[in-house]
Structure formats: C-alpha cells, structure tokens
Amino acid sequence: MNTPRSPGRGWAPGSTTQPRRGGRSLAGEAAQGAGTGAGTMEREGAASWDMGLLKTFDCGEFSNWEKIGSGGFGQVYKVRHVHWKTDLAIKCPPSVHVDEKEQMELLEEARKMEVAKFRYILPVYGICQEPVGLVMEYMETGSLEKLLASEPLPLPWNLRFRIIHETAVGMNFLHCMSPPLLHLDLKPANILLDEHYHVKISDFGLAKWNGLSNSHDISIDGLCGTIAYLPPERIKEKNRNFDTKHDVYSFSIVIWGILTQKKPFAEEGNIYYIMTKVVAGLRPEIPPISKSRPESCSRLIKLMESCWQSEPRNRPTFQEITSETEDLCGRLEDEHKETMQQDLGLQNFQDSNSEEMQMLSTKLRRQSTPPFDKDYSLSELLSRLDSGISQTMEGPEGLSRSVSHSNIGSSDKRLSGISSVDSAFSSRGSLSLSFEKDTCGIDSAATELQKKKLSEAILAGDTGKLMKILQPQDVDLVLDGSSGLLHLAVEAGQEECVKWLLLYNANPNLTNRRGSTPLHVAVEKKFKSIVEILLGRKINVNAKDEDQWTALHFSAQNGDESSTRLLLEKNASADEVDFDGRTPMHVACQHGQENVVRVLLRRGVDIAMKAKNGWVPLHYAAWQGHLAIVKLLTKQHIGSDLSMDMQTVDGKSPLHLAAQRGHYRVARILVQFRSDVNMRNSHFKTPLHVAAETGHTSTARLLLHHGADMEATTAEGHSAFLLATLNGHKATVKLLLENMTNVCMPSERVFSEEDLGSSESVNLSESDADAQYQLSLSSTTGSLSSLKSSIL
C-alpha cells in the first residue's frame, strides 16, 4: 500500500517548518512535560526526543503500509519498521490537513501514554513526521470489540475473567498516578489484545488529569459508539468535573459486553433515547448466560451492578475492583479443579475408550520429574542439558480410535522451547527460553517437555495453566500418538481448552492416523457443545476418515439428532458414502435410529440409493427388524412410487430379509404394503422358501395367508416343504402339511431308500436324527399320506 500523505504542509516535531507557539517547539514542550505528571508543561528550553522518551520517525523508516482501522479518531495503519524488523501501528488524525490544534492533541496523547508506562497500557514509541501520526506497538489480535463481534461462540470463561481483571489492573494503575489519569473513553474498541490475548489499554485522546478538566471539553458529536459507556452524571451535569468514577461506570459496561458478547443498547438507534434511559437508571439487560457458567460468574455480575450505580459515590474504586477480580480469578481455577475431580470420580470419562486416555494420564504422572520442571536458572538449565542429561518424554498415545494419528506439520516450526505467558492473577513467574535451530538436542527436549505440560493441562482441563503456557506455535505440535492438541482436547471433552486452542488458530481440519478430524471425534463421542464450537469455524463438514465416514455417519450411527441437525445446517452432504457405499441414511436404518431417519427424510434424502451390495435403507431396516423405520420407509416408497421389492445384488427383497431373520411384524407391514410374497432371489427362493428353511413358522404362516405359492421350487428343485423338512423344522413342516392340498415332490416322484441313503441327493443333516427317522417312515411306502400321518 502507498504511504498515506498529507496534501497540505508537512509537519514533524522539531522541524523548522512545524507550527510555533510562543517561540517554543511543540516537540520540546511535550518532551519536557512528559516527566512532570499533571504539572504545567514547562516551556523553557527545547528538548529533542530520544529513545529514552519519545522518538521522531521519518516516513522512510516504515514500509508495507496497511490500513487496519478507521473512525472518528482517524485512521490506523500497520507498518513494518525497516531497521527494527518489527510491526508497528501508526494512528493518524482524521483530518487530511493537520492544524495546530490537532498537533497539540496528538502530542498530548503521546505524552500521557509515555507517562503511563505499564504492563497493560499500550506502549507508544513516538511521532511520525509525514503523515503525521502516533507510533505505537502493534497488537496482533486487535481490539476486544473485534474479538467479541467476530467470535460466534462463547469465549472461554478463564479468558473472560482474565480480560476483565487485566483491564481493571490497567485502569487502577492510571488512577493511582498522582494526580490520577482519567481515561474517559474506556470501551472494548480501546482495549487491545496481544497475540496471547493479554490486555493493552489504548486511545488516550480524551484522557484528562483528574480535576483539571470538565465535561465542556468533550463534544456530544460523534459519540454514537461511546454514548452507552458514559455515566449518567456525565449526561446530566455538563459543568461537573471528571473523576475516577466515570471510568468505573464505563468499566461496568465493558464487563457486560464481555459476559454477553454483545453491544450495549444495540437495538436502540437514537443516542438521545439511550441517554434518556441511562439517566432514568436503566441499564443494558442481562440476558440468560449459559448453564455452564462458573459459580464465580454470579459475583462478577454483582460487581458489574455495583459499578454502574447511578450515584458515583456508591461505585467501588479500581483498587477495590482489582481485589475482587483477582479473588474471582483464583476461585474460578479452584472451581474448575473441584469440578474435574468430581467428574473423574463419578464417570471416569463415561466411555470405555477413555480408559486408554486415563492410562495415558497416569503414565504421564508416573514419569519422573524432568530437570526442566524445576525452577532452575538459565545457566543451570543449560548446564544440565550440556552435561548430557536426557529425559525421555512420553506424550499422549494410544488414544481411542478417533485420536490416533495426525497429518499435522512438523514441530520444526516451533521456535521456542519452554515459554509461558503469565496471567495477571498468577503469582508465579514465567520462564521463556529461545533456542537456536542448531541446538537440536536442546530444542527437542524442550519441545517434548512442552508437549507433556500441554497434554497434562488439557487432560486435567486446566484452562488457566493452558493459557499461561500455550504459545501460538504450540497448536502445530504433534503428540507421540500422532494426534494434535485439538484432538486431545476434544477426546477429553474439555470444552474450554478447545475454545482456547481455536482462539490460537488451531486447524480444525487436521486429521489423525485414522483420518479423523476433531469434528469426527466430537460427533462420535456426542459432545454437542464442542460440535457447535467446531462448526463455528471454517471447517470441512464432509471430511472423511479412513473408512470414508463423515461426521454425519457418526451422528446417524449414534442417533444424535442435535448433531445431525447442526451438521445439515452447515451443509453437510447426506449423500456421501463410505467404503461399503452406505450413506448416513443407510447407517441410521441399520442402527435403528428413527429420530435421525426422520430428520434425513425431511431433508429429502434419496431412499432409493443403493450401497455396494445393492442394499437400500429399507433392506437394512428390514434385516435388523426396526419396525418403526420400516413403517416410515414403506410409506415413503409408496408415496414416491418406488417399488417395495427393490432387490440386492443377490436378488433379495426386504421381505426376503425379514423372513430370513423371522421379523414377523416387519414382514406383516411389508405384505400389507403390497410387497410381492412370491418374489424370487438369485437362487429362485421366495420369502416362503427362506422362512421355511430358517424355521420361522409365524412368518411362513403370514406368507401363506397372503398367497405365497407352496409349490414353487428353488433352482435346486426344492419346495418350501422340503427345505423345512431337510432342516428339521417340525413346526414349519406341520404348518405346511396342514396347508397342502396337492403337494408333489420334484418331478412327481417320492423319495426312495436309495435317495435317503445318498447324502448328495437330499443333503440330509446327520445331526437331525428325528427328521431322518420321519422321512424314512414315509419312504417305505412312498406315499404322502403316510408322511403326513407320521409327522402329525
């Protein structure tokens, strides 16, 4: 992008062309005033800016200008410092031509930010000459406003509490200055987040020293994005001096936005109506918060309500607020540990597959503590590494089928070893070591240690620990079981850890050894909330594992109606087939999942689609005896003019399959819907042949009642009667004899003793001595009447 230029006169602090006032340079005034707090800016003697305070930058020092934001404050550009080799942000005034007033405002803002150097205040480096702008640290994640607007699903509770606490700590620092520095424009847009989602408070354009300014200094113009954060006294009393309680009220609305992930009074388009509501004591409505919220959330809501009290003196100070938020953050971690202990004690992860995960967890705990786990100094740590100490690290392996392998990239991308990002409420420091690529042994050991720590944190559901130690490059780590961290978190059902990994841009489409994505795992284990989270990302909902199963196949198998609906809403294909040619509809019918079948039918799924063996969904339902599904499908077949007698590769109709398994009620439904009782399969067997051969007498009676042909013969020339007789099914033989009017054996002959003596002619079972005996009786005379009387 071309460098933005001002068409008017260029201006640089300290240059000969800059505007003058009283013979002194504005840069000199700002430099002298930077260390005086709220005191009157000295105007005696000019002082050049240096890296100790603020620096004057030339336009040529920056490259890669990219506009990343704009508004009433002006424009913000992301730039690359040519010599520093780092990204910075430049905030330029809204006017193309910068007048003296805007120059003074910019210098004043820079001075305040320079004075307010603190961990949670955005660092400022100096002033750019042309275009005129404030040079600041670049925040990778952007603003809290952007995060709340772009994140479709709830943020991790640990992150919400941490952002609230860090914002309170930053504001407390400003108010602890002497005199206090009031921000006066605290809102999510002015709370920036670094790559680790730590807070940096920015935009001091409206900031005032306490007691030195009143509300006349701020115009109501352009306050559409800010009006909801203004306290009622600011609206009612124009002559009132600002005080610290102004920021406290704004902070309460920030808390509301973090809890709800919404904009306050978003439904109101008229700012004057919002002002009227605020003055009347109305506040943004607190909608129902998710059931999974921690108990500490109730206390946080009470804190928020105390901060937005109409009477300023009833609002707490930021010192009181930080004490409360620090305690809440600690309690949140304790709550989670207690919950995890209860869950482990009650359900042991509720799944047999999780036994392997528990064994893994135990295995990790049993490992001797590696030398890196202790608080060694850098020199001690390197000394131990150089002395040849080797520590075998074992990461998560042997997880269940879903979490076996990953096609994740190599861990060579990892640039740092042991590193942790301290949270504001942690009393422990963090150790951050960087290793050069040529120290392969050290880097490998440190990476293995990081894997172990991350795995333990995820398996324990310790989001607080995960937030401290997770680095952006960690999401690409491959565990010993060839799974990614996201697979591990999903397998363990750790919803908050899943959210945090996704915030760090973990790839939800990565696959493990079995070809399963995290979505496969979540759906298979019926973790609905995690399924929702994953579907909120750019994800391939039709990804297939090694068996060519999609996530929809798993939801169909499990009868998971909620996940099925979610997947279909995200355009999951119901026509994807596995290695056996089965669609999710085939799978749902096979496993008797009526609720999923109904959902798929409403989506217009093709019920005539055949699997590799030629089976349609009705075949699976009939074979398994799922009566309710058979009823649904038969009605669909009739309504769609589809044949009830669709045949498999070996010629079987649904009625053949029901007869073979003896599913009497299923067979009754099929014949009621005009299924052909005399349909022949590839061996010329009718359903009656199958029922007689398998000895399902009730089904045979049903078929006879609906016109089944008793005289029909198979390819081998066997009648239903003979098949029942040869297989020793007495009840079926009796039924058939009772219904016989003129039974003829094949070729109009009767069996002789030679026939019975030949195993090839009748293939009589040697184990069925009784049947052989009855046939022997009849064969002596060769008459049907003697056979009938002997059996009856």
Image: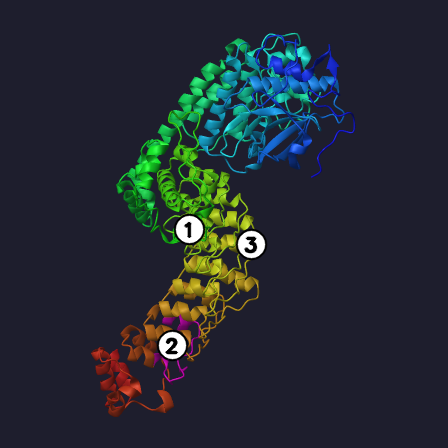
Foreground of the two, 352 or 410: 410
Looking at marks 3 and 1 on the same chain, the residue that comes earlier in the sequence is marked by 1
Task: Report, in whole angstroms, how far the alpha carbon at label 3 lies from the one at label 2.
Answer: 38 Å
Magenta-span inclusion, residue 711: yes
Q: For the residue labelled by badge 1, is the local secondary structure a helix, a strand or a loop? A: helix
Q: Amino acid at mark 2?
A: His
- For marks 1 and 2, give the CA distance: 40 Å
Q: Is residue 630 above or below residue 128?
A: below
The magenta span reads: 700-721
Q: Earlier in the sequence, mark 1 or mark 2?
A: 1
Using the rendered image of the protein, determine whether residue 445 is visible from the camera's viewpoint. Answer: yes
Residue on which disc 3 sits: 603
Spatial CA distance of label 3 from label 1 is: 22 Å
Q: Which residue is mark 1?
A: 524
Is residue 374 highlighted in magenta? no
| Residue 703 vs residue 480, the one in the foreground | 480
Residue 149 in the figure: left or right of residue 324: right
Q: Of 316 and 54, which appears nearest the observer?
A: 54
Disc 3 vs disc 2: which is toward the camera?
3
Question: Residue drawn at (65%, 19%), measured in percent from left and top?
Answer: 107
Q: Which residue is mark 2?
A: 689
Kindly identify the residue that appears in the image at 40 percent across and 65 percent down.
623
Q: Position of residue 656 (x, y in %)?
A: 42, 71
Label 1 crowd (10 A; few <14 / some 14-19 / many >=20): many
Tell me the amino acid under the disc marked 1: Glu
